[in-house]
Image (cartoon, grey):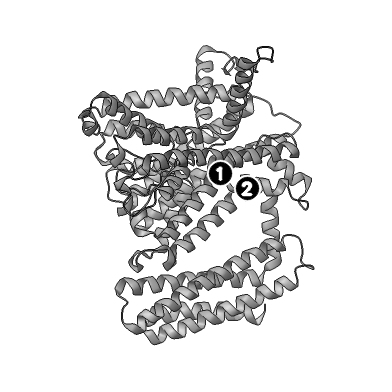
Amino acid sequence: MSIGSVLVLLVALGVVALDVAVASPWTGLIIVFGMAAVTLAVAEEVRQMIFARRKAAAGMDGVLWFEVSLLLALLGFLLARTLALTGQFGGTLEASGLRALETYDLVFATLAAVAGGLVIAPERTGHVLLNMSQRPAMMLIGSFAAMIMVGSLLLTLPVSLTEAAHTSFVDSLFTMASAVCVTGLTVNDVPTVYTPFGQGVILAGIQLGGVGIMTIAALALAFSNNSSLQSQLRYAAMLDARTVADLRKIVVGILAGTFVVEAVGALLLWSLLVGDPRLGEHSAVWMAVFHSISAFCNAGFSLFPGSITQFAGEFGLQTVIMGLIILGGLGFPVMVELVRHGWRRLVRLVKPSAPAPARLSLTTRVVLSMTLALIVGGTVAIYALEFSNALVPASEQGFGRRFMAALFASVNTRTAGFNSYDMGVLRDATILVTCALMFIGGSPASTAGGIKTTTLATVVAALRAELRGREPELGGRAIAPEVLRKATAVLVMMSGLALAIILLLTLTEDQPFLKLSLEAISALATVGLSTGITGSLTVAGKLIVTGAMFLGRVGPFTIALAVGESAATQPRYRLAREDLPVG
């Protein structure tokens, strides 16, 4: 253990103790000097690691980049604390500003302790990072957690906030987890609490979380000359690619398709928003780009007060947003197949001698039919239940606006989280329908959450087959046993998590049960709808919902990967079978 690491740990603890015991400009000056000493010590350790990089063991590059990231974070909070110190000496800081300083000191001390821990055991840390990079399931969890932590630190800095009174690491953690997990739940009003820089951090989290850090990792791995063939094949299997060459094509196609759709959506939204007085001081370009990415990634974040409620009568804007949401919720493989199928049909119309396009795959047919059925069913249910309640303002304008409000709600309920009417006045029956639609969610390999449409279709097919005494089938094809196992695992896991989160929230929050249930399922299914109680959650409630969003984003995919890996290593024997009474 080096002298620098000892200094890092001791000074980190001293900073926290001094800040808790005494809070004054002069103690603040001592704290700033202590922070500077810690930052220099970490910088020296980073310098030594850079010089020793050639002799480092495998996985140490990850430790180096981790340490560099920590150094930049320490430097950022040092600058923030130094800037605030001038306000302390000038006597301009209020009580909220002093609380912000305590937050900076605590976060800085935590980061310093982590940096010291890396210095103490760099080889072990490098070994852990190397194992994670070779296992897609672990890489998924670690990368999402890292993105959330980095974004939370950035949102805590003064440059991200309009006022020091908004400084709260718990709120920043909640907001960034909601962005990276493409949920949309917020405890703060995004346009008034966060500066353009903070909004940019949130948008970056939405984009990375929506496209999937796994996709980006697979891209880097596919074009890397240093990665093993085994690692590349693992990521290829994750994206249903047969070879590494296919992996490259799929990943490039996903990224290119994402940016093309988002660009077209942004252009359409800009044409509808330019010159609109409701934008206020916001740029039409920025608002169009932000909402296009947020809609396609099914995040549900909005820079408009009250989400899209003030655009309830704007058919064009709602249609564009619904189109982006539906495309994002279909899944990248389905979109690619639809584009190829449509192109071949167009070629055949122009050139009748061209070969007829192949039939759509079972996955695409199931996804399209389930998506259409859920949208239509949700629209009818919401229209019938809220005809004389939440849809009353829309009813004053006739059938068209009332129908559009119900359709917009049905599309958003399963995936995104935008809302065009007041969720706080929904009937209990509508809340139950909303919870069911949110729990189902979108489709596999998409930006949406939930158990997925194919999971529901598989479970329903198994139930129908059991009642008829036949083999489970979908679209004229028998369902593989591993697909049934995977669907059952996802359904059971998500149901258990939903019950556990609802139970925890009822213990920590004093709110109606149905509203807490909607909040829990909205977080777990990464939807983002709320009846308006998110901002009033306790600290414990915010942390519970944050964990729910994280589990909802990585949980089903991780189980799917785990089941796939276990299926590839099945034992070459089978136990004796025996009947068990159920039901």
Is residue 512 depicted above or below 88 in this figure? above
As measured in the structure, the alpha-carbon distance from the residue carrying label 2 to the one carrying label 1 is 8 Å
Could you tell me which residue is drawn at 35 percent across and 68 percent down?
A: 164
> Which disc, if any, is residue 545?
none
- Residue 319 vs 171, above or below: the answer is above
Q: Name the residue under label 1.
A: 211
Is residue 416 in view from this perspective?
Answer: no
217 or 207, which lies in front? 207
Label 1 amino acid? Val
Judge left or right: residue 373 versus residue 117. left
Location of residue 363 in the rendering, given as x and y in whole percent from the top left corner: 58, 25
- Please, is residue 21 above or below residue 516 in the view? below
User: Which is more toward the observer, 222 or 303?
Assistant: 303
Circle 2: is it few (<14), some (14-19), or many (20+) Cα within 10 Å?
Answer: some
- Residues marked 2 and 1 touching at CB (< 8 Å): yes
| Mark nearer the N terminus (2 vs 1) | 1
From the viewer's perspective, tell me whether residue 54 is left or right of residue 561.
right
Q: Position of residue 463 (x, y in %)?
A: 50, 20
* SS at circle 1: helix
Which label sits on residue 216? 2
Quick one: SS at disc 2?
Answer: helix
Image quarter where the N terminus lies is bottom right
Horizontal placement of 426 versus 352: left or right? left
Which residue ends up furthest to the bottom in the rendered image? 26
Residue type at the position of mark 2: Ile
Mark 1: few, some, or many residues within 10 Å (few <14, many ≥20)? many
Instruction: Give the residue drawn at x 28%, y 41%.
Output: 310
- Which one is nearer the viewer's eye here, 573 or 291? 291
Q: List x then y, in percent, for residue 484.
A: 58, 27
Locate residue 8 relative to residue 274 in the image: left or right. right
